[in-house]
């Protein structure tokens, strides 16, 4: 299992609790909405018309209710003022609310067509899909309630009501507090919006039924989650639900008990407590940072949400001694913890006092695991950390803390983008000064392009059980949709009336990902899990569930018409027995993803047959495939090629004379078969097309197999101007050229670079007056380097790119520290930039070299046009020499020897390191 697995699961919980917030709405006697939206003109202008707004006045004129027990409603995380401000700002189109709202409604759980994952009677367990059912459904209830509050569209209101009513009628036990309990808090937020807002359709019967559900949750085990022995951040997640229950139920006794736990702490093992007094030390040390950063982030965000609730109650309620503001508690103790956390995650050292977690576990030092991953999107869930919207905004705007008094938190806040945290937690004073964009447009199609004819994996008819499979939201460049994940060993998914089409289809495609080291086997059966086997697909071991890769396989026979198919999943070696995640499935008559045999191409013109299923293309010859499926495109062309000189192939669509959409420059392979890979524009060909490879110049080209794949996109470039900190020396942002000047003998910290399942190189785009020695570390400056090298001077002061081999290749995302010994202007860094076409170095290393015998090792380097480029030797074994394009060497001793070569085309530099075994 990958080291960060548990960290990523905690990030999921962070999303469930810290990102959409728990907005509760009520009707009452004190209208403070106008004050909340002061300074913004014209917010109640008509917004009905060609927009998403149906009724602009939901909640308008309704204020805060003070119950007989003294609780303010709404009073969990969001107040009436904040909800009304959200509504008005979205309707007006003011930033950041406008952008935040767009992200909310792009989420598939915010759809009025959302399909429930529950309800269930019992929610328990650990690391099984069942614990997420109420979490996902609660999120959907809250999102739909917010959509109704903003737009007045009754479809959203009805969906939220339906989710709450179904769970209220079913639940009898809920003991899972990490992932399930936050779903209860979200559902409570939706319930108060509906309960206290006119026109919602909420009834007294709804109040009674949902109160019963909350009494279950607020019971001790084995019924509920009311316990004080939960482990660190896990207690925070559980207590979000418990505080929500206390407020909704107007129960002062529960509120007092939970308030004591969140401040002083009552965990029988004090070192494992989540409370402000025990989790955060006087100097701000957040103790769970000794475990890893995501779990510590969970402490901050859950404590902040609880603090937000107590702040609302202390400001607007009438709870007497219970009206404690946890933001201000103990001289802003929560702020000191956030400042300490931000400083370390920006790349700076922090003092650390060893923390005795329990009698057997000591956190000796701060943990670098997932360091720095909180300034951009929390990578798996497409949301940002609420450190800005909730913690920074409160201390800066509500309590008046200056940036100079929280320099690290304010610096991190500036790097955190806008998302739906901002929808609920942005004060009016933080509104953009730009011109409002107007009301939101009607909902568009946020999902994938339907022309690709995919079947969403989440559109199943039946599964082997809610404890074997779950649907989960996902958003990327392909659009917003639900995916299937956490599939258990032996689990199955059924799709009734799966349409193979009228034309025979013999290829099955599946897009998925897995945190495993071996492929997951996906058997495709007809009718039942034990029915006729018609295909064997795989989920590739991509390093993580949501790092997707498309795999294609041939069916045992061509299929037409509609059939029931069942996918069964086995073979993963994941420690939790998870088989992976599936985004979509589809069938085709042929796939660009497969190794397509050139000699078997159905369309050939001017070709010459060759041995071993190869075909030779003289000038003007072509081969083609009809109705080849490219889905949403490919950015990598790979072929088994043999040439005796440089040559060129063009990819054309429609016919051999059709438009050229890609050109592939082929090197001189010396008459031997070599794999050649070329990049292309990802969307040069999309969907199903007739495609042809045409030889347009140069030597004859012999082809064995060809394929077009997704490549490794996206390895997103990280701009150097996103620098998080400069732990050593000095750096200066050069605004005019969007670059960073790093002085000599300096070290900078860059936001985590996503290496996915493993990259080969790290590319630096830079300029320098002379050679610059560079060392790259991940996570800490004292870790072993992942890349080292000398960057050549830039010709004429122009930007150039150097690719440093990664050693070894890290996986997933890592904070990067880059140290230089001379001044350098850095533009960006990027893992494996596939579209830049660096020089391609080839070293033909023998399997074994004998000591005492001369060996000649051919090397070659070509640019994107197939032209030979300069090769230099950076490291050679003793006695070896580079003679033009051959390394000549007589090794003296046995053992492994290293060779490092450099290919330089004047713009880009490629280093290649190989090892030679000497026997």
Image: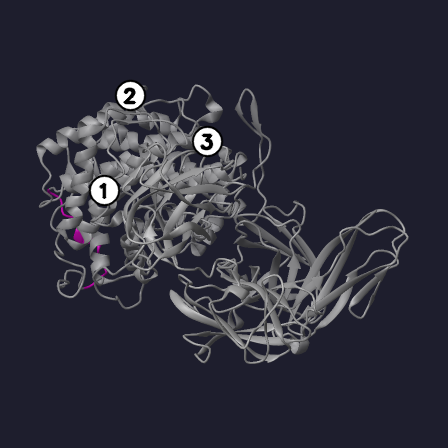
Q: Is residue 200 left or right of residue 500?
A: left
Task: Determine the main secondary structure of the stretch shown in magenta.
Answer: loop
Who is closer to the viewer here, 495 or 903?
495
902 above or below 108?
Answer: below
- Name the residue located 49 percent from the left edge and 57 percent from the top edge: 594
Per the model, the C-alpha gap separating discs 3 and 1 is 32 Å
- Residue 358 lies in the magenta stretch: no
Of the pair 416 and 339, the residue shown nearer to us: 416
Give how far apart the Cα atoms at labels 2 and 3 are: 27 Å
Q: Residues within 10 Å of mark 1 (few under 14, many from 20)?
A: many
Span of residues in magenta: 29-41
Instruction: First in sequence, mark 1 or 2: give its number.
Output: 1
Which of label 3 and label 1 is nearer to you? 1
What residue sits right under mark 1 in the picture?
141
Q: Which residue is mark 2?
A: 223
Q: Position of residue 227 (x, y in %)?
A: 35, 22
Nearer the camera: disc 2 or disc 3 = 2
Mark 2 or mark 3, earlier in chain: 2
Give the residue at x 75% y 59%.
900
* Residue contact between numbered discs 1 and 2, judged by CB atoms under 8 Å: no
Query: Can residue 547 be seen at all in this image of the molecule?
Result: yes
349 over 600 or under it: above or below: above
Q: Is residue 447 left or right of residue 672?
A: left
The image quarter containing residue 567 is top left
SS for dot 2: loop
Asked if the stretch drawn in magenta spans residue 35, the answer is: yes
């Amino acid at each position: 299992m990958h080291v960060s697995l548990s960290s990523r699961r905690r990030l999921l919980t962070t999303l469930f609790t810290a990102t959409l917030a728990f907005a509760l709405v009520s009707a009452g006697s004190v209208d403070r909405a106008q004050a909340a939206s002061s300074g913004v003109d014209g917010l109640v202008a008509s917004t009905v018309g060609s927009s998403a707004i149906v009724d602009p006045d939901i909640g308008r004129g309704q204020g805060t209710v003070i119950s007989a027990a003294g609780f303010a409603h709404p009073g969990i995380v969001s107040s009436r003022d904040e909800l009304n401000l959200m509504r008005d700002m979205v309707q007006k189109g003011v930033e950041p609310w406008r952008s935040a709202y767009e992200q909310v409604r792009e989420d598939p759980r915010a759809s009025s067509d959302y399909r429930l994952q529950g309800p269930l009677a019992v929610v328990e367990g650990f690391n099984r899909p069942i614990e997420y059912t109420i979490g996902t459904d609660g999120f959907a209830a809250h999102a739909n309630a917010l959509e109704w509050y903003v737009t007045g569209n009754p479809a959203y209101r009805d969906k939220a009501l339906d989710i709450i009513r179904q769970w209220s009628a079913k639940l009898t036990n809920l003991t899972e507090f990490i992932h399930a309990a936050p779903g209860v808090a979200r559902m409570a937020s939706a319930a108060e919006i509906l309960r206290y807002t006119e026109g919602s359709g909420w009834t007294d019967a709804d109040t009674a039924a949902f109160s019963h559900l909350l009494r279950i949750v607020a019971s001790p085990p084995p019924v509920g989650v009311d316990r004080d022995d939960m482990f660190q951040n896990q207690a925070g997640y559980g207590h979000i639900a418990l505080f929500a229950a206390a407020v909704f139920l107007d129960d002062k006794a529960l509120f007092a008990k939970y308030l004591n736990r969140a401040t002083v702490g009552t965990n029988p093992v004090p070192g494992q407590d989540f409370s402000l007094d025990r989790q955060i030390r006087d100097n701000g040390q957040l103790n769970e940072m000794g475990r890893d950063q995501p779990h510590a982030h969970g402490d901050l965000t859950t404590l902040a949400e609880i603090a937000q609730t107590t702040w609302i109650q202390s400001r607007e309620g009438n709870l007497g001694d219970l009206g404690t503001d946890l933001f201000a508690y103990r001289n802003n103790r929560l702020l000191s913890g956030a400042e300490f956390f931000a400083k370390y995650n920006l790349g700076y050292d922090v003092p650390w006092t060893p923390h005795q977690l329990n009698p057997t576990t000591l956190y000796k030092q701060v943990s670098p695991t997932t360091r720095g991953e909180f300034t951009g999107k929390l990578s798996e869930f497409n949301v940002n950390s609420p450190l800005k919207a909730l913690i920074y905004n409160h201390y800066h705007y509500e309590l008046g803390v200056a940036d100079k008094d929280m320099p690290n938190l304010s610096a991190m806040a500036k790097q955190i983008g806008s998302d739906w945290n901002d929808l609920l937690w942005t004060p009016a004073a933080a509104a953009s000064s730009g011109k409002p964009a107007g009301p939101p447009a009607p909902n568009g199609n946020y999902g994938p392009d339907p022309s690709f004819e995919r079947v969403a994996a989440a559109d199943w008819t039946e599964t082997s059980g809610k404890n074997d499979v779950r649907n989960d939201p996902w958003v990327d460049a392909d659009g917003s949709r639900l995916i299937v994940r956490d599939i258990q060993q032996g689990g199955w998914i059924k799709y009734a009336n799966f349409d193979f089409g009228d034309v025979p289809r013999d290829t099955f495609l599946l897009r998925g990902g897995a945190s495993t080291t071996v492929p997951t086997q996906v058997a495709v059966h007809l009718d039942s899990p034990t029915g006729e086997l018609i295909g064997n697909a795989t989920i590739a071991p991509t390093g993580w569930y949501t790092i997707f890769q498309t795999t294609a396989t041939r069916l045992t026979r061509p299929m037409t018409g509609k059939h029931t198919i069942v996918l069964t999943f086995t073979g993963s070696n994941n420690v939790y027995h998870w088989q992976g995640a599936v985004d979509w499935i589809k069938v085709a008559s042929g796939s660009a993803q497969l190794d397509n045999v050139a000699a078997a191409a159905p369309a050939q013109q001017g070709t010459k047959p060759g041995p071993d299923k190869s075909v030779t293309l003289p000038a003007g010859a072509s081969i083609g495939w009809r109705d080849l499926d490219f889905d949403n495109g490919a950015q990598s062309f790979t072929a088994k090629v043999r040439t005796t000189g440089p040559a060129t192939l063009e990819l054309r669509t429609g016919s051999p004379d059709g438009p050229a959409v890609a050109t592939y420059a082929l090197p001189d392979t010396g008459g031997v078969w070599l794999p050649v890979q070329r990049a292309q524009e990802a969307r040069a060909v999309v969907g199903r097309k007739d495609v042809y490879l045409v030889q347009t110049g140069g030597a004859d080209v012999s082809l064995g197999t060809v394929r077009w794949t997704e490549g490794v996109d996206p390895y997103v470039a990280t701009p150097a101007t996103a620098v998080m900190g400069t732990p050593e020396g000095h750096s200066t942002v050069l605004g005019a050229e969007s670059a960073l000047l790093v002085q000599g003998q300096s070290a900078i910290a860059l936001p985590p670079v996503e290496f996915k399942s493993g990259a080969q190189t790290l590319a630096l785009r830079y300029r320098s007056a002379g050679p610059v020695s560079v060392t790259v570390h991940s996570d800490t400056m004292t870790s072993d380097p992942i890349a080292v090298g000398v960057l050549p001077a830039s010709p004429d002061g122009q930007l150039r790119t150097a690719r440093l081999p990664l050693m070894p290749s890290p996986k997933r995302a890592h904070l990067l520290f880059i140290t230089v010994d001379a001044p350098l202007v850095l533009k960006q860094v990027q893992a494996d930039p596939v579209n830049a076409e660096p020089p391609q170095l080839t070293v033909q290393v023998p399997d074994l070299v004998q000591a005492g015998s001369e060996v000649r090792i051919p090397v070659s380097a070509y640019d994107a046009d197939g032209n030979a480029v300069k090769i230099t030797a950076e490291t050679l074994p003793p006695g070896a020499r580079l003679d033009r394009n051959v390394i000549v060497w007589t090794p003296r001793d046995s053992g492994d020897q290293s060779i490092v070569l450099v290919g330089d085309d004047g713009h880009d530099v490629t280093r290649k390191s190989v090892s030679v075994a000497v026997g």
